[in-house]
Amino acid sequence: MPRDLILGTAGHIDHGKTSLVKALTGIDCDRLPEEKARGITIDIGFARLDLGDFRLGIVDVPGHERFIKNMLAGATGIDLVVLIVATDDSVMPQTREHLEILRLLGLRHGLIALTKCDLVDETTREVVELEVRELVQGTFLENAPLLRTSAHTGEGIPELKAALADLCRHVEERTGEEWFRMSIDRSFIVQGHGTVVTGSVTSGRLRVGDEVEWQPRGERVRVRSLQNHDQGVEEVHRGMRAAINLAGVHNEDVVRGQEVATPGYLVPSRTLTVRLHCLADVKRPIKHRAPVRFHVGTAEVMGTVSLLDSDAVQPGAWALAQVFLDEPVTAVWGQPFVIRGSSATQTLGGGQVLQPVAKKVRRRHLEMQERIEKLWSGGADERALAVAWFGGFSGFTAADLVRGANVGPDQAPAVIERLKGQKALVDVALGSGRHLLLHADMIKELDERILTALGRLHEQFPLMTTHDRQKVQSQLDYVGDDTLVHAAVDRLIAQKRLAGDLRRVARTDFKPKLSANLRKLKDKVVAEYQQARFTPPEPSSFAGAAGGNAANLRDLFDVCVAEGYLVHVAGDLYLHGEAEAEMRRLVTEKLSDGPGMTVAEIRDLLGTTRKFAVPLCEYLDRAGVTKRAGDLRVLPMA
Ligand SMILES: Nc1nc2c(ncn2[C@@H]2O[C@H](COP(=O)(O)OP(=O)(O)O)[C@@H](O)[C@H]2O)c(=O)[nH]1
Ligand SMILES: [Mg+2]
């Protein structure tokens, strides 16, 4: 089986890129009527070249400075490049710009073709060769083969093919499992078949009948049929040009920049964290908050740069940054991107994606920066841990590691097991078979937050022995699964750092300020209120027992209310919690199968006196149990 690779062209307009592809393949890549009429390439065109051991899909790009965005869409999936320089024109602005873009895209393999050699003499050829050699110094093309060609006379074409075949042998083969991914560069309708999307397959393989996720829409669609260079095939894989017939997709909904991928692989985001390089030969640095055009895959989206560790990236320098985009894009860890000025007149820089799906990070936050740097400098385990850490309390999945840490899909389970073994990751069971994978720091962090929140409550209510678990959770500044908090509280109870039950908890290091006497008094108060039901005692009747200290007595009643033993009705009137519930039940029951009741009737129902009946009725109105209708109390619905 020949190996499939994708070759791109690059170079200034009119330098003979399209002519050279035609001389190599017999295919005219200028397919648009406007391209034919004007004789220039506007959008990317495609050809194929068989080289025995290798099959090249060729993407011919436009050289015109106005169509750089199309060049970028074409260059995004290529494995090797032919940089083309016309001998009658030598190095020109887009020769430089295309080379810069190829460098930013991380291209490693290519060769140089001098074209139109039929137009110039030997001396000129030599001068141009020197100029080109100088241009590529320090780049991946530094030692690249340089061939002299002419599309008109055929000079150098066989040698070019041989050099390409040789170059292909140097492109490293990828081993290990990969998920499928293709960034869409074109779409059209085939009569009777529906929408077809095309692109360069950048990873994995895809078969007829498979399902792909169409991003950023997040829709799952079925692959009806596949083509590679106009031939029906059962499968496409990395390095191939592919045309995918998608079931149930409207052509008008497809735009360049969308992707199709293995479901779960890509997640669209408007915020990405990146390492950003400012090109050495731009005039001004890239400033914090600069508006830019962000090119990733075949997508081009407007956005703003936020520099995390500086106010400007100087020409030639690198920085950590986040980009905030107007539209969501899909990317993976390490993926190259390019940024251009917002008016699209200049390529400013580019770099690699570190977090394809990021949350906004505070600038100049050293700990965050260190964690983000780990995503670049660290090995697979460290990258995985960084992804887990940024997953916070929501945790992470194996797919997050594939997308965000460049861990192979076949490697992810082993990485997770290893890190769990090292206690760096924790697998929390959430009940009913659900699991949550968390960075171990999150468990510690949650414990800390629970202890701190409870500590604050103890400080605020020094007399209260315990607090409601729900109340503690509401003070955590936590968004995530409730079960996780419950599990953490249970664990803290098991570790004896908390004391409590299913309903209420306290820190074990907390000593309630209630003296032994007051604790005894509290039990007495609660017991008396329980006994008295709807004819409760006056708080002042306990003043003597409280040592005549009014503040103590007030605190004591507050504690009883906070702990749910008593309910405050009005003024000095309290009911035992059970009596209050009983009152609601009795009144509601009576009213739901009878007419309204007067205060006197409610008084008799509760077996109390007028002194209590009036404030109790008003309490029931406030609580929404009853409402007033003239002299009567009725149910609020009535
Ligand atoms: N004499 C000569 N002209 C060429 C050669 N290659 C391309 N041209 C001409 O240069 C012009 C631009 O070529 P084209 O392939 O469209 O350039 P591109 O913009 O780089 O794709 C056309 O008029 C071609 O006929 C060549 O090898 N010799
Ligand atoms: Mg062209």
Image (spheres, rainbow, N blue to C red):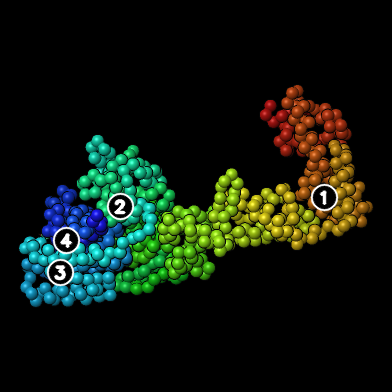
At x 42%, y 60%, the residue is 406
Residue 17 numbered mark, or none? 4
Place residue 302 in its image quadrant: bottom left
Identify the residue position indicated by label 1 in the image: 557
Answer with mark 3 or mark 4, whichever residue precedes in sequence. Answer: 4
Report the residue that reaches farthest toward the right. Answer: 544
Q: Amino acid at mark 1?
A: Phe
Identify the residue position indicated by label 3 in the image: 147
Answer with mark 1 or mark 3, whichever residue precedes in sequence. Answer: 3
Residue 268 numbered mark, or none? none
376, 310: nearer the viewer: 376
Q: Give how far apart the Cα atoms at labels 2 and 1 are.
A: 74 Å
Q: Which is closer to the viewer, label 2 or label 1?
A: 2
Q: Which is closer to the viewer, label 4 or label 1?
A: 4
At x 55%, y 60%, the residue is 420
Classify 10 Å Cα crowding around label 1: few (below 14), some (14-19), many (20 and above): many
Identify the residue position indicated by label 2 in the image: 237
Q: Amino acid at mark 4?
A: Lys
Badge 3 residue CB within 8 Å of ligand 1: no
Residue 477 location (% of width, % of height): 61, 55
Q: Which is closer to the viewer, label 4 or label 2?
A: 2
Q: Amino acid at mark 3?
A: Leu
At x 57%, y 51%, the residue is 480
Residue 342 location (% of width, % of height): 33, 60
Disc 4 is placed on an element classified as helix
Q: Give how far apart the Cα atoms at labels 4 and 1 are.
A: 88 Å
